[in-house]
Structures are given as structure tokens and as C-alpha cells.
Image (spheres, grey):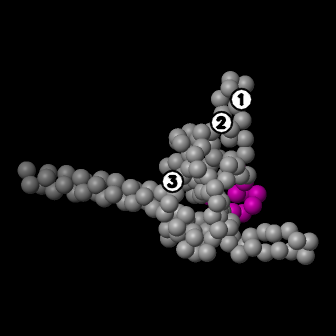
Amino acid sequence: MKKKLLPILLSLFLVVMLVVMTSCIGSTLVEKNVKNRLKDEGYTVKNITNCAITDGWNVPDENGNAPANLGTMLYGTLNPVTDDEGNVTYEHEIWIIYAKDMDSAKWVEAKGKEKAKETGLSIYRHEKIIIYGDLPSVQIARGY
């Protein structure tokens, strides 16, 4: 009886630890926490309604359904650089998209992967949250 109890307890402990660790990751990606982390690093963070990886998210198809249902979208920038013609680019840019369902998150992630191939930027998804930008910015937003 004791030999069977130990593996069961060990398995239960591992499942509980997995759930706790997963929930910790999700709580660090809450909008307020991400905004504060980025602002603490000197980023300017603002809400946006569209970006390159969400383009067309609210355009209905022939059945009247939009391809994605998205909530808050954040855009963070750091270290503006102005060229000779007066055009401003940023040394670091990041977009954080909070989808309202898993299908919408998959849609944004797929568009982000396509764009990342062109731009060389990084994309990260945790459940319904998609983070797209340069690697140092994504690491800051993720919390490590």
C-alpha cells in the first residue's frame, strides 16, 4: 500500500506545481503589470486599435464574421531615432495584444509569425496574449 501511495502523491504534487507555475506566468502578463514593467524600463506605452499583425481583425467576411475578437492592444517604444529627413523610428518597439478567445489568439499569432519572418522580430504567445517586438522588449514584457 505504501509503495503505491508515494507515486500517487508525487504525481499529484507535480500537477499542482505545474498549475501554480502556469498561473504565475499568466499573472505577470496582466495588462497593468506589463505596462508598469515597460514604463519602469523607460518605454512610452500607449493603447492602439490596430497594428501590422492585427490588420483586418475587425473586417467581416462574407458571412458577417470578423476573423478575430480582440481586446486591449498596447504599443511600447523606446529610444526614438530621427534620420536626416525627419522620419522617426525607434530602437525598441513592442506590441502586446490581448485576444478575447483562443481562436482569435491563434489568428493573431499566425499573422505575427508571418510578419516576424519578414522583419526578424520575435513573437511570443501565452494563452490569449500575444507579444510581438524585438527580443529585449519581449523579454521585458514577459518579466525576464
Q: Which residue is mark 1?
A: 61
- Measure the alpha-carbon separation of dots 3 and 1: 27 Å
Look at 61% across and 75% down and name the residue there: 42
Task: Tell me which residue sits at (68%, 23%) in the image.
Answer: 63
| Residue range highlighted in magenta | 114-123
**Element type where label 1 sits in the image:** loop
In the structure shown, which secondary structural element does the residue marked by tag 2 occupy? Answer: loop
Q: Can you identify the residue that label 3 sits on? A: 126
Instruction: Classify residue 91 as left or right of residue 68.
Output: right
Which badge, 1 or 2, comes first in the chain's sequence? 1
Graded by Cα atoms within 10 Å as few (under 14), some (14 to 19) or many (20 or more), the crowding at tag 3 reads some
* 137 left or right of 142 in image: right
Ranked by sequence position, the earlier of labels 2 and 3 is 2
- Work out whether 111 lies above or below 143: above
Give the residue type at disc 3.
His
In contact (CB < 8 Å): disc 1 and disc 2: yes
Residue 135 visible from this viewpoint: no
Left or right of 46 in this view: 23: left
Residue occupied by mark 2: 67
Graded by Cα atoms within 10 Å as few (under 14), some (14 to 19) or many (20 or more), the crowding at tag 2 reads some
Of residues 77 and 128, the one nearer the viewer is: 77
| Crowding at mark 1 (Cα within 10 Å: few <14, some 14-19, many 20+) | few
Label 2 to label 3: alpha-carbon separation: 19 Å
